[in-house]
Amino acid sequence: MSGKMMQPTLPRYSISMILILQLIMLPFGENASEKLEEDLFHYIDTHQDDFVQSLKDWVAVPSDSSDPQLRADLIRMVEITAERIRTIGATVDVVDMGFETLHDGQTIQFPPAILAQLGNDTDKATVCFYGHVDVQPAKKEDGWKTDPYTLTENNGNLYGRGATDNKGPVLAWIHAIDTYMALKKDIPVNLKFIIEGVEETGSPGLVKLLKEHEKFFSDVDYIVISDNVWLSRKPALTYGTRGNAYFFVEVESGKKDLHSGTFGGIIHESMRDMVYLLASLVDTSGRILIPGIYDDVAPLTEEENKLYNSIDFDMEEHKNNTEVNTFLYNTKEEILQHMWRYPSLSIHGIEGGFSGVGTKTVIPSKVIGKFSIRQVPNMQIPVVEKLVRKHLEDVFAKLNSPNRLKVSLEIGAMPWVAKVDDPQYEAAKRAIRKVFGIEPDLIRDGSTIPLARTFQDLTKKKVMMLPIGGADDGEHSQNEKISRSNYIQGTKIFASFFLELSKLHEDLQTKSNLKNAKIAQLIES
């Protein structure tokens, strides 16, 4: 009896009271939310020149992570970013990432990483934004029409190295927060940042950083990455990427190169073996010939298949952009599926053979073929490696060659896929509808972005890729740019995303409270 009386109970009207309060507050909350978004968007529009100037200042720093001569500039860029995040009131931890050993044995300092936090209200959702402030190499003489480190506006586009990858999106996120603060409005979510300076060189040390700062992610609900671009001119959300298994296959026939006039026709040539091996990997229709390679590919569900119908994708425009005459497939759906959700095998080159201008009658003693397989869910690296190795060894055995064969896996990056009905995707869709008035495309990325899978595996949090860059931004290429429109509208998307996610989070909490109230009443009864 006393045990029953001691149990915490809720009044019998608790469920109805929660529902009534929810209904009463709904119109007021919606009206206030719409007015706030109007104010946010107006502020962003009227301050867009200031935001462009900020990007100009950041682009001016040549933070190329691949050039040791620019390491001081790279470290300065990270320090500038840390100080900028402090100005929005965040607590910032600049984490020492140690030293890098170069090919010549020299050691130089890695740029530090940034872990920052703004807000710790336990009633709010906590969103962690990942970005990087290092860039790809860029020189005017490489074919740039403008100085790559001087942001130049032309026909509504902002040209400069890092404009879209990734300084523009990082600043857009910060400017979205700035806007709330300028309007003296409460930021509706808690925010965390993880910013690094070596993404373009493979993010060495990132896994260690995540493991050593596990506590930093303990209260994070969602992780957002904005480090890719749309498929077309239409806004998009990315929910999957392919992995990458990159192989070297080496054939060695001797210790030195030989003259084809003296030795041609009397030895087993390594290049001839290599051509047989590479030709055995894939057929002329693009189908991979390695037995068992398709066995673990996730089947195409009816739900997923429907996603391709509404995607804005112009085959002819894509053909023109890539400057090819024809594709292997004839429909939009087939092309997108083979870009995103089916594996592909590409042969990249042969090291060791003569590839210079002119003629050279040499028989190379050792050649290394290089190819990669873009993996998809549910393919596993160890299984793929085993299948590739067995196939090449079987083909090589049939050649009856005395040469030496060696197969090695150089890169093993797993694919990533998210659930498009998770709250962060719904919030992003709402934000894009508010800004652009259209439903975004839900897309995958045929390339490999290891960070998404790394964050998902190590933090066990929900990960979303929310791009703001356009399909023609030319990241990694000459004349990289982001349009002024995408930069400013992207800032609005982030500002709206905070608000929409907070509303969804509140709804989830209300449903949880209703469920708990019902359980409590059942216990009481």
Image (cartoon, rainbow, N blue to C red):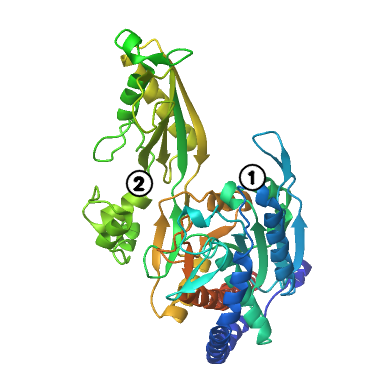
Residue plotted at (44% across, 76% down): 156
Side of 347 relative to 325 (left or right): right
Q: Position of residue 107 (x, y in %)?
A: 73, 39
Give the CA distance from mark 1 to mark 2.
Answer: 29 Å
Quarter holding the N terminus is: bottom right
**Residue at the spot of label 1:** 204
Whether residue 515 is visible here, answered yes or no, is: no
Q: Which quarter of the rendered picture does the C terminus lie within? A: bottom right
Label 2 secondary element = loop
Residue most toward the top?
A: 266
Callout 1 crowding tier (Cα within 10 Å): few <14, some 14–19, many ≥20: some
The mark found on residue 149 in the picture is none
The structure residue drawn at horizontal position 63% and vertical position 81%, both measured from the top left corner, is: 179
Contact flag, marks 1 and 2 (Cβ < 8 Å)? no
The answer to whether residue 41 is above or below residue 322 is below
Q: Nearer the viewer, residue 334 or 254?
A: 254
Can you identify the residue that label 2 sits on? 342
From the viewer's side, name the closer residue of 454 and 69.
Answer: 69
> Among all residues in the image, which is located at the extreme left?
330
Q: Decide if residue 294 is on the left or right side of residue 152.
A: left
Give how far across and how far down residue 85 sits, in percent. Answer: 70, 69
Q: Is residue 277 left or right of residue 285?
A: right
Q: Position of residue 101 (x, y in %)?
A: 69, 38
Left or right: residue 310 versus residue 106 is left
Label count reads 2
Front residue of this view, candidates 5 and 72: 72
Where residue 406 sits in the image (x, y, percent)? 46, 21
Specify the quadrant of the image occupied by residue 390: top left
Please state which amino acid type lies under the numbered disc 2: Tyr
Residue 495 visible somewhere in the drawing: yes
What is the quadrant of residue 501 in the picture? bottom right
